[in-house]
Amino acid sequence: MSAHDLPGDPLWPRASAWLTPASDAHPEGDIALLGVPAFRSSITPTGANATPAAVREALTRYSTYSASRDIDVATVSAIDLGDVDEPDGAAGHARVTAASADAEGRFPLLIAIGGDNSVTLPVMTGLARGDLSGWGLVTVDAHHDLRDGKSNGSPVRQLIDAGLPAEHVVQIGIADFANSPAYAKRAKDLGITVMTRASLRGRNMAEAAEEALRIAGHGGRPVYVDLDVDVCDRAEVPGCPAAAPGGITADELRQLAQLFASDTRVRGIDITEIDATIDAEDGRTVRLAALLVLEIATGYALRPDAT
């Protein structure tokens, strides 16, 4: 059954109806959602450009109510800014940066839906308005993303080259057999804080998030969070080309999304590296991305200054 064919119930509003199109919205709100369907610079061929639209459709399958928190995220105003047109390449990155900078002044939190991991560079640069020196970064990712060149494997290196202080970069979930000695050494030499997948086994996610925010957001600096979904176990995210067996669970990623979004220092979060065109028939990877959007909104509602 297509999401559009699902029965309606006025007492069970669907999360897809929670998003207000920018054309119908007031100029400001709580959360902005921006689609960034980048895919051309990916190391692994991908159809990640299909993912923002797929995530919006997947929201149709969920309600806006978090039972565990007794929070209805419908009370959080969420404006859908649509997709950035042709976000790849230098000209595309400039469009993404401009769209993110425009959102920065109007929304306390921006959710960027990729697209591959190359989107982290222009979205964060836009939110920082080109000055990364006062920001921190948390990546939840199996990979360091410190490669040479310009690809979805290099956004962290490019951000540091552009002025992001490496001592305020934290990487959670770095996996065995997914990186090289050269790039592991680069992370160490730069002073990046690395929490490997192995170090997370048995660890409370709240403790890991608290440590990451203490380092990335030291001194009250704003923080950007990159949620690369290939950090998860491949069985749970078949739509992530680079995911491997033994990653963190989908539930752990959901916890982290909510924990980070609840901190007022976090100004932007992206969800990347899902190829909707190769997802399992049940759409489990894209559905996880939709749940991450809702977990982020729940976290936002938990902020002390949230309306």
Image (cartoon, rainbow, N blue to C red):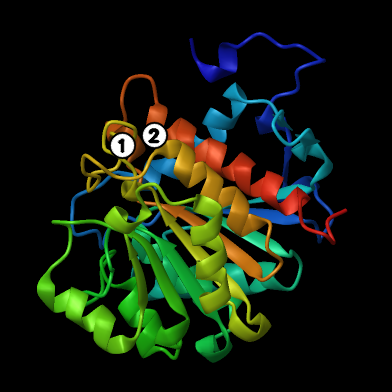
Name the N-terminal-most of marks 1 and 2: 1
The residue lying at 77 percent from left, 49 percent from top is: 301
Please tell me in which quadrant of the rendered image residue 18 appears: top right
Residue drawn at (63%, 77%) of the image:
222
Q: Residue at image x 29%, y 42%?
A: 240
Where is residue 181? Give x, y as percent: 11, 73
Q: Image quadrant of residue 27?
A: bottom right
According to the picture, the residue beneath numbered tag 2 turns out to be 285
Residue 113 position within the rendered picture, expressed as x and y whole percent measured from the top left: 50, 51
SS for callout 2: helix
Above or below: residue 77 compared with residue 250: below
Residue 95 in view: no
Q: Which mark is residue 249?
A: none
- Relative placement, left or right, of 8 versus 149 is right
Left or right of 66: which side holds 283?
A: left
- The reply, left or right, for residue 245 in relation to residue 100 is left
Q: Amino acid at mark 2?
A: Thr
Disc ID at residue 239: 1
**Is 69 above or below relative to 145?**
above
Placement of 233 over or under 305, stated as above or below: above
Q: Position of residue 200 (x, y in %)?
A: 37, 54
181 or 18: nearer the eye?
Answer: 181
Question: How many marks do you count on the picture?
Answer: 2
Q: Amino acid at mark 1?
A: Gly
Evaluate whether residue 107 shows in this view: yes
Q: Position of residue 286 (x, y in %)?
A: 43, 34
| Foreground pick, 2 / 282 | 282
The alpha-carbon separation of the residues under discs 1 and 2 comes to 6 Å
| Badge 1 vs badge 2, beta-carbon distance below 8 Å | yes
- Badge 1 marks a residue whose secondary structure is loop
Disc 2 packing (10 Å; few <14; some 14–19; many ≥20): many
Mark 1: few/some/many CA within 10 Å (<14, 14-19, 20+): many
